[in-house]
Every structure is written in structure tokens, then in C-alpha cells.
Amino acid sequence: MQKYFNMYRESILFVILAIVLCYAAIGQLKPKINDYNSVHNDIAQKKASIDQLNAQLQTAQQQMARLEKARIANSMVNKTIFQPRSLSLDNEAGYSVLFNDIFEMTKANKIKTYSIQYEYNPTDDPFAAANKGYNVCLLKMKLIGSFRDFENLLTDLYKYPYFISISSYDIVPYYKDKNVLFIKLGIKVYMKGD
């Protein structure tokens, strides 16, 4: 037996050393594996809570949109459609009061107007199409101003006593100064006519 032991001594020592090293490696890896599993479970829980919060946020946004539509619908009941003093005026002259009010609102809110296009009686307006005796003009305005000034303009337009609607908007920040906005704003103004 001693003869076999001496002959395989190095192999036996190598096997014992390999077993001890494996045991030490397992002892070192086991806490790391446990930490990995714990972190993995935490990430899964946080992802689940993020998904739940996103679902709640989406529900809240939908509810806010419904409330905003209802609020706008209720506020529109109090608005009147502009009627010029003289019905004999042509469209452009009749709209002049509305145009002037909107231009004054932009000036009062420190917004620069650099382009305006007028489209009289656009065919895609459902209100004018459904109600005879009303005219509509779409103002396509290109504006420059700050976010706060644009917000104030929208507030003033909302408070305007005559029925107008914002049909489109496109906001792009200026690449050199993100506080300056390039704004394309479409406003429909309505007027009683012939």
C-alpha cells in the first residue's frame, strides 16, 4: 500500500488540492450567486412596479383628456360666434376685428409674428359645413417666442369671448437657444355671415 501511495502520491495530492480549491471556489461563488439572484429579483420587482405605474399614468392621462374635453365643451357653451356690425361687409373686412384681436394678443405676450396665411372657408371644417350662415377662416401663423409667452397666448385665446379653435400647432426649439421656440399655429376664427 505504501508503494501505491508513493507512486500515486502526487496524483492523490493533486486530486485533494483540486477538491479543496473547488470547495473554496464554491464557497466564494455562493454569496455572489445569492447576490446576483437577489439583484435579479429586485430588478424584476422594479420592472413590474414601473409597468404598473405606467399603466396608472396612462389611465390618469386618459381621464385628464376626457375631463379636459368636457371642460372645453362646457366652456364653449358660453362663447358666441362673432357677428360683424354690418353684414354687408365682405369676408376680409368682417374678420378684421377678430384678426386684430389675435394680433394684439400675440404682441401683448411678446411673441413675434413672421408669417401669416389666410384660408377662407376651408372645406374640412365640420362646423361651417354643418351650419349654414357661418363663415370660417383658418389663420396659419408662424411665430417666435418663449414657452412661457406661448402658454400665456394660449390662455388668452382660451379666454377670448368669441368662438375660435386651435386647429394645429407645431413647436420646434431653436437649436442655438432652447428657450426660443419656432411655432406654427393654426387658428380657426368663426363669423356669422350670409
Image: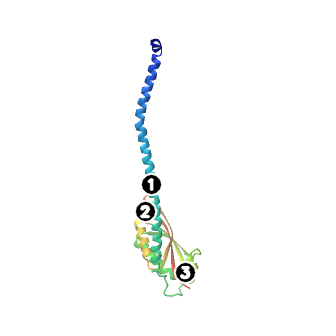
Q: Nearer the viewer, mark 3 or mark 2?
A: 3
Disc 3 element: strand
- Residue at the outermost top position: 3
Q: Nearer the viewer, mark 2 or mark 1?
A: 1
At a point 42% along the width and 44% down the height, the residue shown is 39
Q: Which mark is residue 135?
A: 3
Residue at the disc numbered 1: 50
First in residue order: circle 1 vs circle 3: 1
Residue type highlighted by circle 2: Val
Whether 59 is drawn above or below 123: the answer is above
Q: What's the residue type where badge 1 is placed? A: Ile
* Residues under numbered marks 3 and 2 in contact, where contact means CB atoms less than 8 Å apart: no
**Residue 73: x and y, percent?**
47, 75
Q: Nearer the viewer, residue 179 or 20?
A: 20
The kind of residue tagged 3 is Asn
Q: Earlier in the sequence, mark 3 or mark 2?
A: 3
Q: Is residue 147 left or right of residue 117?
A: left
Q: Residue at x 44, y 42 (%)?
A: 37
Outermost residue, front side: 1
Answer with the quarter of the image where residue 102 lies: bottom left
**CA distance separating discs 2 and 1:** 34 Å
Q: Secondary structure at mark 1?
A: helix
Q: Looking at the rendered structure, which numbered label has been put on residue 19?
A: none
Whether residues under marks 1 and 3 lie with C-beta atoms below 8 angstroms apart, the answer is no
- Are the two marked residues, 2 and 1, in contact with CB atoms closer than 8 angstroms? no
Distance from the alpha carbon under mark 3 to that under mark 2:
34 Å
* Secondary structure found at label 2: strand
Residue to which mark 2 is pinned: 180
User: What is the distance, in whole Å, between disc 1 and disc 3 at their CAs?
Assistant: 49 Å
